[in-house]
Image (cartoon, grey):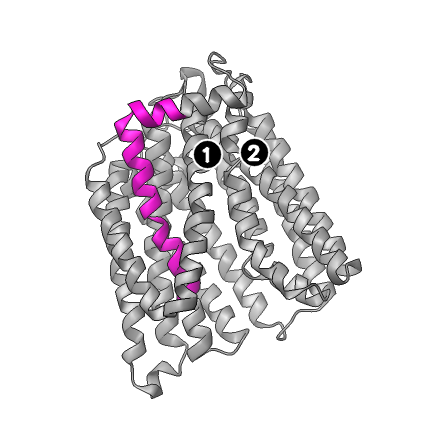
Amino acid sequence: MASGETQTRLYEWLTGDEDSRLCKDIPDSACDEQPRNFFLHLLASLGNKLADELSSARLVLPWLLGAIGAPTWMVGLLVPIREAGALLPQLFVAGFIRLKPRRKGVWMVGGLLQALAAAALSVLALIGSGGVGGGLVLLALVALSLARGLSSIATKDVLGKTISKQRRGTLMGWSGSVAGAVTLAAGAVLVLFDDRPGELALAVLLGVAALGWTLNALCAAAIEEAEGATDGGANAWDSVKTGLALMRDDAAFRNFNLTRALLLSSALALPYVALMAQDNGGTELGGLGLLIVVSGVAGMVASPIWGKRSDASSKTVMRDGAIGTTLCCLLGASLAWLPESMSASVWPYALVYALLVIVHSGIRLGRKTYIVDMAGADNRALYVALSNTITGVLMLIVGAVIGALAQWLGAGPLLLVLAATAALAALSALRLPEVE
């Protein structure tokens, strides 16, 4: 009993609420379990984020391909596979998930499949070689990304059933803060590595990632989830038709997806600020390690603040994040005019990178809270899946366009283009209705 009381008091302290029985938009049976479920969600997020960082398609997997002697062109496939592979299939599994009264089992399966894929990558770090090894890495990444998509949609649906409105943003904010601390630790470890970690070091990193997703799956299994409605389950084609009808008939959902598409500018700007840092100031790994460290600190500090604000008005958080992205991109582009003595240091770029991480974390929290609160219990899985599928398609298209522009214009001018896109996102966010 004492443990339960301590847990409840800690929950009330983290949420700033004197009554742990705030139960808005969740079943009454979920009220008593909300503090316990809150911490299970938090621990699951820690495992997931740790695994994400230690299997990063922008950091660890390129080193893995280099270490096993895979062809260089394979490196360019890592990020598109990781991101789009997790988003594109979600619409097609939404109907399947809808048929299940409890969705935490789908989340658990997704976590275990990611753990198996990470374990396969760990083995490949030790025995993989050349083009065959590189091809197997890409196949394992495809499996990991598809499983990630399965977990993503189920996680949000379970969140909507177990954590009350006006508490979800707070939960995701604290999750982001814990994740920032994990990122900070990972960056500090990576700074100690040589220019290219050995196969054993990579195998250990990916093995820990597998343990992180195992923890995520175990927490999912332990969450107390009430049965939900199963009406409206559909096959993939029915889900597509329903999704298209939603885009046509639901103006708020349509405008949210337009805003979310324009907000991709914050995610697309981050690697180009890092590229400028590498080109102008940092050592190959030292500068990268510094960016990871400042990213961890920024996320750890900013996420709880954004989370509390998202519970008040997630649309305002998206707007402010878009304005912040505009300013950060303009500041990043202006670094080209710094005196050579200053531009030769990694620190100005690290500062811009940290500021951009802060506003990007706000955008992520704002849009996640908005869509969970906008959708009702009966259609939340479909809304999330459709929005993620649209974003996955756009990521492939916009990513290719941005890459071509970067090749033509260079990183600095490209940031001006992304600043203009973010400004349009701020205007688009103003059109969204309040949903809290």
- Of 325 and 197, the residue lying toward us: 325
Per the picture, the main secondary structure of the magenta-coloured stretch is: helix
Query: Dot 2 lies on which element?
Result: helix
Where is residue 412 drawn, in percent x and y?
A: 34, 70
Q: Residues within 10 Å of mark 1 (few under 14, many from 20)?
A: many
Magenta stretch: includes residue 268: yes
Q: Residue furthest bottom?
A: 341
- Residue span colored magenta: 244-273
The label number, if any, that marks residue 150 in the structure image: 2
Q: Judge left or right: residue 393 versus residue 371.
A: right
Magenta stretch: includes residue 208: no
- Taking the image as drawn, is residue 386 in sight? yes
Number of residue marks = 2
Residue drawn at (52%, 75%), measured in percent from left and top? 286
Residue type at mark 2 is: Leu
Query: Dot 1 lies on which element?
Result: helix
The label number, if any, that marks residue 38 in the structure image: 1
Q: Mark 2 or mark 1, which has the lower sequence index?
A: 1
